[in-house]
Amino acid sequence: MLKTFSLGGVHPAENKLSAGKKIEVLPIPAQVSIPIAQHIGAPSAPVVNKGDSVKVGQLIAKSSGFVSANIHSPVSGTVFRIDNVLDASGYKRQAIIIKVDGDEWDESIDRSQELKKEITLSPEEIIKKVGEAGLVGLGGATFPTHVKLSVPPGKKAEVLIINGVECEPYLTSDHQLMMEKGDEIMVGTQILMKALKVDKAIIGIENNKPDAIEHMSKLAAQYEGITVQSLKVQYPQGGEKQLIDACIGRQVPSGKLPIEVGAVVQNVGTTYAVYEAVQKNKPLFERVVTVTGKSVKNPGNFLARIGTPVTALIEAAGGLPEDTGKIIGGGPMMGKALASTDVPVTKGSSGILIMPDEMSKRKETQPCIRCSKCVSVCPMGLSPYLLMTVAEKAMWDRAEEEDVMDCIECGSCSYTCPSNRPLLDYIRLAKGTVGQIIRSRNK
Amino acid sequence: MSTLIISPSPHVHSGDSVKKNMYGVIIALLPALAASLWVFGLGALIVTVTAIAASVLFEYLIEKYLLKVPSTISDGSAVITGLLLAFNLPSNLPIWIIIIGALVAIGIGKMSFGGLGNNPFNPALVGRVFLLISFPVQMTTWPKPMVNIGTYLDATTGATPLSIIKEGLKNGDKLTDLLGKIPSFADMFLGEMGGSAGEVAALALLIGFAYMLYRKIITWHIPVAVLGTIAIFAALLHWANPEAYAGPLFHLLTGGAMLGAIFMATDYVTSPMSKKGMIIFGVGIGVITILIRVFGAYPEGMSFAILIMNAFVPLIDRYVKPKRFGEIVK
Amino acid sequence: MNVVLITIITLSALGALAAVILYFVAQKFKVYEDPRIDQVEEVLPAANCGGCGFPGCRAFAEAMVTSDDISNLYCPVGGADVMSLAAKIVGKEAAASAPQVAVIRCNGTCDNRPRTNTYDGAENCTIVATLYGGETGCSYGCLGLGECVDACHFDAMYMDEKTGLPVVIEENCVACGACVEACPKDIIELRNIGPKSRRIYVSCVNKDRGGPARKACSVACIGCGKCEQVCAFDAITIKDNLAYIDYDKCKLCRKCVEVCPTDAIHEINFPARKPKPAAKKPAAETATDKKPTAAKTAAAAKTEAAPKTESKEKPAAPKAEKKETIAGEVDQKKQTEKKTPAKDERSAKKSGLSDAKDKPEEK
């Protein structure tokens, strides 16, 4: 039976141009730039210096706080420099630049391909190992996984939800991962279930991936406690709160985390990385990235090492098309437009979408006609038209009253608005300003 | 390759536009237009064409010479105002009165507040009520249905069902007797009754409603709330005293109930932004309409009811919020 | 007649009753306010701009009356005159404070700082600043969308269409600080107006190293340190590849302006420089040819009436001065070498920095 979330949502054209394309291993570039801020939380502290030689999987930056993550070298070679490099944030931030030499892996990593089902570690050991491996949420949010798995005292996890939804148009990396590494994802799910001490896991997959639903359902039958839930194709089905609402019918209250309703959500990519980290001692240093776009010659899913410049990915997909207007890191609804192709792939890079010129320009903004379509589509039940107006007038206390901080920035409102109003632009401005006001108030 | 374009997300758009919605409403009004031509003939045609032309012209002139802003007549909203204004007028109204009505509707009802999106009151109704109060005689002489196809100002006139019932009940006649003097419900459903040009054909209006629902231009909330409240309130009164109060079907099919509920109350700009608010809005309109019809001085109260509730919309929007995520925790 | 009489009597009685009730209620709920608050409010400019840090002139007047020490209270709109009047009313000492003006510390015009991408989104500087570094290679510079202009309540700012930068109208600026708050890149600063309205400042906030900074903008501060070396009053500090002039220490000698290789330092409202004596090299001749042109434009700009704006002076002059610098560098070096032999040692020690300038393409 198809389930879905309670409020709002839109259905943009799916355009899964790279669906079914097998994961291709991208050749290792000559040089990688690894930003030290690839995750939510404090940037990591480098533990290597200029001139050091490193191996694949070696720790190069250490977690610098509770909410932070380790970073491991994706290549073997020599540290060329630690310098400010333009990354997907739009600004230059500190990165470790490594000149590649060969492909020598750290000895502790098990490179064999056989499936290892037995889980020998205890829950605490699993969480520790996940943290050591530098795992972060690969759905795009990049929240450090070991922090998410550490249930705060007083709260209890009841169910694990694996996010195989991939609701963003164009992106197919999670889909392909499920088709090719289904077993590993199942074992990864069991590892996570053990770490959270739950006996129930639901893998949510959107209905536009029937082959994945079938494949994963067959596999799930062989594993204790795991079920597959097919979900209506509705954006943002993959949003954490919406997914929990759809799968178990509970709504995370305003301002609280999913653990409040006993749920923990992890992306399938993260789950696969958990399997690799716990069973094969492999830290996180590569991920599947979808390269796609209407004019792209060879859209596909590529396994790329962290720090690879985006140019290499575009080359592998057939080169930058002539009519390129925008290059988007991520999907078209929440992805970030890149100012240059020299930006490196990071742990959060789910896809590179190249948009042709004619699709890249926004239409002219008109006054609000009060059609209330933005209110109808908002998955959080907010009033985007009002939030934009109060943000334009700098009425921050009113914005806070209208729960602007609950916005998940999905973009459904701007997508729908018949007057082409930049609703999300101003709502983000309000969130930033109100967030700062709240932080300074709580100090 | 020219320089890259950078913009904040989202990077795709549904393709919806103000124009698409406005033209969708115009298409939804076409069955009612056809019905009005069939029932009232030439008069309806002249009134409709005059009202639309005058509305568009006034919007163009005001924007170009008074406000000095780019023209917005291509978005279709002036056409709708003209069309709906025409549907609210008797089909033998002189041209000069229609033009005044259009001037008030567009000039005062819409442009004086800042153009599309800024007006608190439904512009077509502002024009209509202005005319009703300024020209009460011309605005309440209704051409007879079906017999005035080729006539305009010289149409033969007769009373509308609403005024027949209202006058009769005031004189003390029994309802059952009065019902014999008005067309049957079946005839009224098809539009064969006296009234304003566009309000008579319930069937045509309902077809338009279905079309707008299909195109996702409006949702069901306001029309169902208005008509439902009218039906329930009328039913209660009728049940209390069957000879003094007309029943729900009568009130639904006569006057501007259908037109008002489906096309006037659902105007984007002047209706609430949340579903809960829309229901409250609709209930308010229904209650006030029946109160005016039954206890008030006018036989028809829909236009006033909508304008009164329009005034409450900012208050409704301020305190009635849409359903929030996170309110239900099972 | 009776009716009229009764009406008059009744209404008068009601009126009198109401007056009595209101009098007693007013007395019971009376709030005592120091009458000096009203007096101070009288002398304040009544702009209610918030530049003093208080919500409105009345709140400032209250603070003036109730605070024991008013040395940190200052009304930028009224300035020293209003402060001394108000201080007299409350019988306290007002702080002496120099009049200030808003200064735009960026000269990244459309000509100086080429565009590398196109922004297509809501036209608001803060929104762009949270998204990325802007349409040029300099991620610190002005974004040109005018949030500062919108924030100004005194009509003291406007966007120059040609340069893409905001311009401060000195006559109208009251140094309330609204534009400083509004700018998400911290480009605008309140600096002393200076004697005869003369002031000198570094018109750049770029913290990148010299190479990338110069690549992005031809008039960027590259942090070479020449200005720091030449300043005899320790007014200039270099931090994060960026020079900063302390306006309290600056004595307006203009030496830093002369030595800056990228023309990043601006001098405002100064008279034309005396043309230098002709040197032997032909390159120097072209330098002297160009100097009078620069002097003419500077003089012409200065003798212009009322709202003289900074940008008018600068874009006209830099092109001329730029060419002059390249040709006249030799000239200036000779001059500084002649006049300040002591500084020679310093420049020799700091040769590393001048090396940075010679390799603009360093990555």
Image (cartoon, coloured by chain):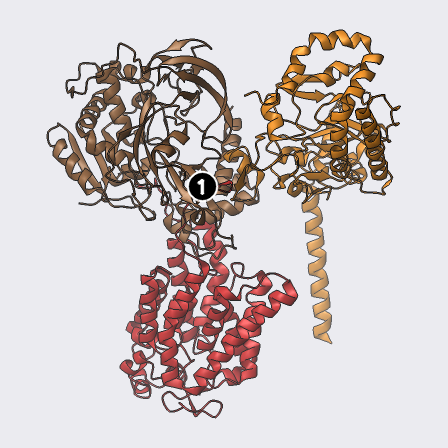
Chain colours: A brown, B red, C orange
Q: Quadrant of residue A293?
A: top left
Residue drawn 61% across and 70% down?
B61
Q: Quadrant of residue A300?
A: top left
Tell which subunit mark 1 falls on. Answer: A
Q: Quadrant of the N terminus of chain A?
A: top left
Which residue does the numbered mark 1 point to in the structure image?
Answer: A326
Query: Relative to A279, is A220 above or below?
Result: below
Q: Secondary structure at mark 1?
A: strand
Asked whether residue C235 is in view, the answer is yes
Asked whether residue C64 is in view, the answer is no
Residue drawn 70% across and 69% down?
C7
Q: Count every numbered label the image shows and give the total.
A: 1
Amino acid at dot 1: Lys
The answer to whether residue C17 is left or right of residue B63 is: right
Q: Quadrant of residue B112?
A: bottom right
Residue A153, percent from left and from top: 31, 20
Residue B39, percent from left and from top: 37, 85
Label 1: few (<14), some or many (≥20) within 10 Å? many
Compare residues A347 and A139 and report the one nearer the observer. Answer: A347
Query: Relative to C176, is A48 above or below?
Result: above
Compare residues B198 and A29 and report the one nearer the observer. Answer: A29
The answer to whether residue C66 is left or right of residue C341 is: left
Spot the residue most to the left.
A222
Residue C40, percent from left and from top: 79, 35
Query: Relative to A19, is B252 above or below?
Result: below
Compare residues A79 and B259 and report the one nearer the observer. Answer: A79
Residue A176, percent from left and from top: 24, 34
Residue drawn 44% across and 55% down?
A418
Compare residues A324 and B93 and report the one nearer the observer. Answer: A324
